[in-house]
Amino acid sequence: MRVHTKLLIGCVTVLWCTCPAQSAPNITQAVSQDCRWDYHNFCSDYGIGSPLLNYCFRRNGAKLSRACVHALIQAGDVSKAYVQARQRAGH
């Protein structure tokens, strides 16, 4: 179990160091306002601006409120095509 945890931490660290701009969400006023409930209910373990916050929102995409998803699309954090593809796939 400890080896898996160390491996996961190592992978996350490498990803974070090599592409932090792609991992960090764009926190606009609309995202801050419209995703507040979603953040507190699904991703509050990750700090605002954390590289893993974007991953958490994607992982919980099917549970996010419509207002939050719309704000994330408008901010450029996720594309409308990506959201539609996930919806078609049942995610």
Image (cartoon, helix red, strand yellow):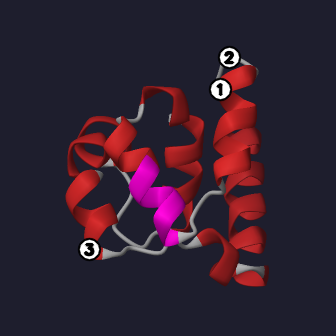
50 relative to 65, above or below: below
Q: Residue 18: image x %, image y %?
A: 79, 82
From the viewer's side, name the closer residue of 11 and 57: 57
One can see residue 1 in this view: no
Distance from Cα at disc 1 to Cα at disc 2: 5 Å
* Label 2: few (<14), some (14–19) or many (≥20) C-alpha neighbours in 10 Å: few
Pointer 1 and pointer 2: residues touching (CB < 8 Å)? yes
Dot 2: what SS? loop
Provide the residue designation for mark 3: 29
Horizontal side of residue 60 vs 20, given as left or right: left
Q: Residue 10: image x %, image y %?
A: 74, 62
Sooner in the amino-acid sequence: mark 2 or mark 3: 3
Which quadrant of the figure has residue 48? bottom left
- The magenta span reads 70-75
Q: Amino acid at mark 1?
A: Gln
Numbered mark located on residue 37 in the image: none
23 part of magenta stretch:
no
Q: Amino acid at mark 2?
A: Gly
From the viewer's side, name the closer residue of 62 and 7: 62
Sooner in the amino-acid sequence: mark 3 or mark 1: 3
Provide the residue designation for mark 1: 87
The number of numbered discs placed on residues in the rendered structure image is 3
Tell me the chief SS of the magenta region. Answer: helix
Residue, x 29% and y 66% (percent of image)?
30
Residue, x 78% and y 51% (percent of image)?
7
Distance from Cα at disc 3 to Cα at disc 1: 25 Å
Provide the residue designation for mark 2: 90
Q: Amino acid at mark 3?
A: Gln
